[in-house]
Image: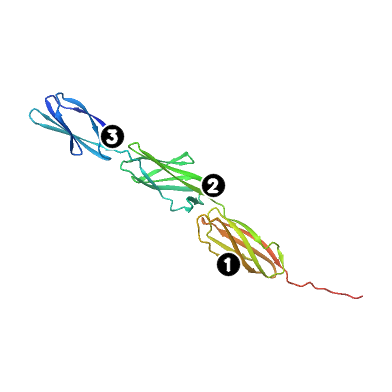
Amino acid sequence: KSRQSVNLSIVAQAGSTVAQILLNDAVVFNGQQPFFNFSYPLNLTVQGENHQRVRILDNRSNAAEDTRIFFYDTVPPIITIDTSRYGNNLGLWYTNQSRIEVKGSLNDIAPMKQVKIFLNGVFATNALLTSPTAFIGDVMLQEGTTNVTVEASDEAGNARNLSFLISYDTKGPVITFISPLYNLTKVKLQTVNATLFSNYSFADIRFIHDGKTRSEINIPFVPGVNLVTVTKQISLDEGNNLITIIATNGLFVPSGKSIMIRLDITKPKAEIRVE
């Protein structure tokens, strides 16, 4: 366990005269004992297994021996959480799934007792120990950011916890058109400007003109970049033109927004009648 001192109670038959105690093959006690039973405080010397032997000799030098193994551990488990399936933005993990698997590995010299998972400080579930050094547990996230804490304890009574923040995000980017300001124009070549905001950066942005993709912009993922401005020149057709921007964030959650621009380049016809 986590106690370094162990009190040995040694019982031997009457007539025994010499007692010898060894710890990890080193003699820690060697002396005469007038009684056939006595106590001895044994201080464990190494983390992990401590092999203790007691050897008793009688008046005729006959020996009896008994062996015990004491496990001494004061070091809490080392926890590693596998977050490779989530996106990361400046230390905050993101997912578009409400149910996630919290999995990871453990490193300890003592056997594991249990692994608990907490969400925002509230107990959620006991993780399954899939092996002596691995765990997995399912939890349900609420929309927004959640503090996930993994607490591991070993059989020696040592415990450690490790936390990470994860955001459950099902919202696509917010798209705002800046220009053109009017939906009726006589200028064929129009510059379309828009701002896009996303909680988790961007994967791609597409300009669609009347149902046909006219341009695709690949935005490289840059942690902390949540707001971008995009510009595209579009040649309008006579009549109504539906301009749509489709943006997908880094979690592959899309959103779209459209504007209608009417190009009118037909000159009005004038007819003069003389009566």
The three-letter amino acid code for the residue at tag 2 is: Gly
Q: Earlier in the sequence, mark 3 or mark 2?
A: 3
Q: Residue furthest bottom?
A: 274
Q: Residue furthest left?
A: 60
Q: Dot 1 surroundings within 10 Å: few (below 14), some, or many (20 or more)?
A: some
Q: In which image quadrant can residue 230 be found?
A: bottom right
Q: Nearer the viewer, residue 238 or 92?
A: 92
Q: Nearer the viewer, mark 1 or mark 3?
A: 3
Q: Position of residue 221 (x, y in %)?
A: 50, 59
Q: Which residue is mark 1?
A: 215
Quadrant showing the N terminus: top left
Q: In which image quadrant can residue 180 be found?
A: bottom right
Measure the C-alpha gap from mark 1 to mark 3.
70 Å
Picture layout, residue 176 above or below residue 135 = below
Q: Tell me the element at label 3.
A: loop
Q: Tell me the element at label 1.
A: strand
Q: Residue furthest right?
A: 275
Q: Position of residue 138 (x, y in %)?
A: 45, 45
Q: Nearer the viewer, mark 3 or mark 2?
A: 3
Measure the C-alpha gap from mark 2 to mark 1.
33 Å
Left or right, residue 193 beside residue 105: right
Measure the C-alpha gap from mark 3 to mark 2.
46 Å
Q: Earlier in the sequence, mark 1 or mark 3?
A: 3
The three-letter amino acid code for the residue at tag 3 is: Gln
Q: Earlier in the sequence, mark 2 or mark 1?
A: 2
Q: Dot 2 surroundings within 10 Å: few (below 14), some, or many (20 or more)?
A: few
Q: How is the image coloured?
A: rainbow
Label placed on residue 4:
3
**Badge 2 vs badge 1, beta-carbon distance below 8 Å:** no
Quadrant showing the C terminus: bottom right
Label placed on residue 144:
2
